[in-house]
Amino acid sequence: MAKTARLTVDITGLPASPRLVPGGAPLKFTVTMRNTGATDHPLIAPVVRFDQYDGGLAPLGSVAGRLERFDPATGSWQPVFLPQASGMDFLLAATGGAPLPKGATTTIRYRVSVDTGLRAGATELQVYAVSQPTNQQAGMATAKVTIAP
């Protein structure tokens, strides 16, 4: 019998009803990835993105903005690419993976803001755990977010 490689992803730290104002203050959250399977993940990288929505920017309803990751070594926020691709192409944006052995957990702090020009609506904040170098989805979590100008 083959061993199962399972990975869970959780988004925490968001308010009960997360809301972003275009051009406004960032929303902070934490991503936790846990290897709950029986095998090691040699290289896992997170990808954070928004799902498209009717109030987004043309042509695909994209949610343009700024994503930053907290670097505990420097105590500062560092810019991270916020992919806007359609389909599953955004998985190719996964970079900088790290090993996640069985039973291990990794936690990453982020903050995200959205650009002006978005109309009111709702979308999903999506976090994918991506197995590298194959760029295959190994886990995912979502959170509903309101965009309210």
Image: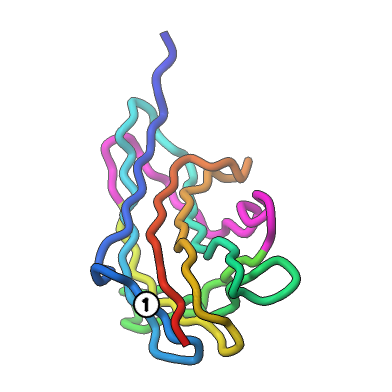
- x, y percent for residue 47: 51, 58
Q: Which of the pair 68/106 is nearer the observer?
A: 68
Amino acid type at circle 1 is Arg
Q: Which of the pair 37/87 is nearer the observer?
A: 87
The residue segment tinted magenta is: 85-105
Q: Secondary structure at mark 1?
A: strand
- x, y percent for residue 9: 36, 48
The magenta stretch spans residue 28: no
Marker count (numbered):
1
Residue shown at 47% from the left, 56% from the top: 46
Image quarter of residue 83: bottom right
Residue under label 1: 19
Single out the residue that lies furthest toward the top.
1
Residue shown at 46% from the left, 49% from the top: 129
Image quarter of residue 144: bottom left
Q: Which of the pair 46/143 is nearer the observer?
A: 143
- x, y percent for residue 17: 29, 70
Can you say whether 147 is above or below 23 in the image?
above
Q: Residues within 10 Å of mark 1 (few under 14, many from 20)?
A: some
The magenta stretch spans residue 98: yes
Single out the residue that lies furthest toward the right.
59
Location of the N terminus by quadrant is: top left
Image quarter of residue 11: bottom left
* Left or right: residue 31 compared with residue 93: left
